[in-house]
Every structure is written in C-alpha cells, then in structure tokens.
Image (tube, coloured by chain):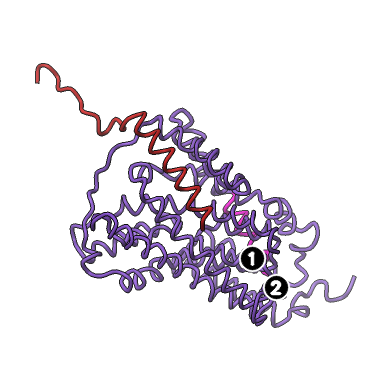
Chain colours: A red, B purple
Amino acid sequence: MGIVFLTLGLLVLVMSGLNRWFGPGPQTKQTKKPRNA
Amino acid sequence: MPDNEFLGVLALTWQAAVMLGLGGLLIYLGIAKQVEPVLLVPIGAGVILANIPLGGLTEPGGLLAVLRAAGIETELFPLLIFIGVGAMIDFGSLLERPYTVFLGAAAQFGIFGTFFLAYFLGDGGLRLFDFSFKDAVSIGIIGSADGPTSIYVATVLGSKYAASIVVAAYSYMALVPIIQPPIMRALTTDAERRLTMPARARGVSRRTRVLFPVVTIVVVGLIAPKATPLIGTLMFGNLLRESGVLERLSQAAQNEMTNIVTILLGLTVGGMMSAADFLRPETIMIYVMGVVAFAAGTAAGLVFGKVMYVASGKRINPLIGAAGISAFPMCARVVQKVGLEANPHNHLIMHAAGANTAGQIASVVAGGAALALVPFFA
C-alpha cells in the first residue's frame, strides 16, 4: 500500500505542478467579447 | 485408431459434462441476462470447446493451446487490451481533481486484505486450501477489479488458478452495481451521502493532457518497474487519444484491436477451464474471496473518503471513495446513482470518475508492486 500511495502521491504532485504551469484548459479561459457585441 | 475416436460421448466424463453445463451457463448469463456479454459469451464458448472429449483444441497444436501459448503465456493479450483501455479513458476528471488519486490508492486495500486472507487459508496458516504464496497474490489481485491486471499478474506468477481468477474478476466487475450499494449505505450517514460537490472544476490544458501519459510512464516505471508493461501500454493508448493527431489509431485501438483481442482472450480463458483444474474446492473459495476483495476495496475507499470528508471541512462526499476500485466506469455510475438517491441535486459523477480512473492507475501500480515483492517472500 505504501508503494501505491507513494507513486500516486508523486504523480499527482508532478501533474498538479504541470497543470499550474501550463494553465487551465481552454474551456475555462475568459474569452474576449466581440467589439460589436 | 481406437474405435471410439469418432464417438466423443463414450469418453464423456461427469466432470466434462459439468464443464459443458458451466459453459452453457456463462453463455446464458451473457446473452439472456446481459452480464458482461462481451466476455462471458466467448469465455463460455471456450469452456465448451475445451471440454468436448477428443476435440483436441487444448492439446499441443490445437487452436486453444496455440492461443494460450501465444497470447496468455507471453502476456500479450492483456497488454494489447490495455492499449485499448488507455485509448478509451479520459483522465481529465482525475487531472481536474487531483485529490481523488488518493481514493484510488486507498481502494487497493482490497488486494492486500484478500491476499492475506488467501495466504492464511492456504500455505501461510491453516492449509485448508492449496493456495501457495503466488496463488494468494494472484487471488488478491481480483480486488483491483481490473481484468487485464488480474490476467497479467496470475500469468506472470504462474498461478494454477489463473482461469478461475480471471473469470471471478470479470464476473464481479459485472456485479459491481449489486455488491457496492449496500456497503456504501452501511458505511456512510445520510448527511454525508446528501453532500453536494461542485460539478465544474479548473480546466486542464491540452499540454497537460498530452504530458500526463508520458509523465505517468516515467514516474510509475521508476518506482514500480514491474508495472512498466501494464502502465506503459495503458498510457501509450491514452497518448494516442490525447495527442490530437492520431485519431485513426486511437479509434483502431479502442475498437478493432480491443474487439479482436477480446474475442481471442475470452476464448483462450474459457479454454483454460478444464474440468481437472476447475472442479475443486479452491475454485469455489476463489469466488468467495472475490466478493471479499471487492467489498474490502469498496470499504477502504469509503473509509478514506470519510477521512477526506472530515479533513476537507465537510466539502468532499465520502461516497466517491467507493469509485476508487478500478471497474470503469461502473463504479462511478453506482456512486452517482447512490448520491442521487440521497439528494436529487447531487451529481457526483465527475468526482467519482476521477477516483475511478485513479483506481485504474493504482491497480496497475499495486499489481507491479505485488510482482516486485513476490521474489522476496515466495
């Protein structure tokens, strides 16, 4: 169980860092309103 | 040539007749009751083919013997299936909610709990059943609720119960909607089950999605090298999906390849169920322990979910812990259903999917860890 928690803990740490670094996905990005809207 | 070479009925033993009946039952369950028909129908057909007296399919050179040597003993079939599974899984829910990974890890307790039980009943204690250390590890892996990992570990360890273990693993995956809800209701309060969680989460960039399979192979491979074949094929399949430029290959992995290998795997697993190997008390005990394994994994996930419920200041619904066992996507659906029963506005599916996909990775890591540890104890 220790190996499972260690591996997944490390994985989530790395992936959280990468996700923070690369920013959120396009679906949550604020899109600019068209000027004529 | 003996006279009865043309009359298999003269060579039919009662054990073979029971196996023919069992094959028919599996086909019936698959077609009439819709219980995992994709697997149970080929497995049932394999059982019948293997137990027809003088049929010769399991003898050297026979179809089932060739398939077993080529696909099971080389561990090829489960690994090819994993490429398809990886291409089917969207790890977005997990990446958006990283905390769910720990629920996937906690639910693997079922593996270790069942292993200890099997070993205690076998060579490690009471000696009531013919379970060696390697058999006990293979039986424990049923608790991962992960068919390909069960096949892989049982084959690598050379367990004599590989066929029973695989059939038990796949049978119980189909029974998740029956096994889990009573345990979920018993271990959580009504207030806990009613707790709603926000459906929306911080998004995940495409780069993160693409990097995830590669990083997972490296991280898991470096810590649990024995899991590399399983995690490598699973994540390669996911890379095909997330790359965005290999749609054709991703579809081929999800459909054509998985379908073909499933047919061959089902037939071969069924072909491994000969009367001599299958009709023993140990087989029945493996089925009993399969339920124990699923129940223990579910309970461990729920208990860890309750810990997170308290630690998060009552913001995490402990029900999602039950999705930590990797039967995908049945567990996540069951969590959603039980959550909705308690509160019609409670949509837990995305959170449960995170724990469910984490369970898929965790079960592979647990399988790799088990394979790595066996040489030290066996």
Q: Is residue B286 left or right of residue B8?
A: left
Chain for disc number 2: B
**Residue lying furthest top:** A35
Location of residue B120 by image quarter: bottom right
Disc 2 + disc 1, Cβ < 8 Å: yes
- Taking the spot 33% from the left edge, 71% from the top edge, the residue there is B187
Quarter of the figure with the C terminus of chain B = bottom right
**Kind of residue indicated by mark 1:** Ala
Q: Secondary structure at mark 2?
A: helix
For the stretch drawn in magenta, what is the main secondary structure?
A: helix
For disc 1, the marked residue is B163
Tag of residue B320? none
Which of these two is toward me, B304 or B118?
B304
Q: Is residue B272 left or right of residue B305?
A: right
**Crowding near pointer 1: few (<14 within 10 Å), some, many (20+)?**
many
Tag of residue B277? 2
Residue B250 visible, this orientation? no
Q: Is residue B309 left or right of residue B214?
A: left
**Crowding near pointer 2: few (<14 within 10 Å), some, many (20+)?**
some
Coordinates of residue B141 in the picture (x, y in percent)? 56, 62
| Residues tagged by mark 2 and mark 1 found on one chain of the structure | yes
Residue B266 visible, this orientation? yes
Coordinates of residue B225 in the picture (x, y in percent)? 62, 45
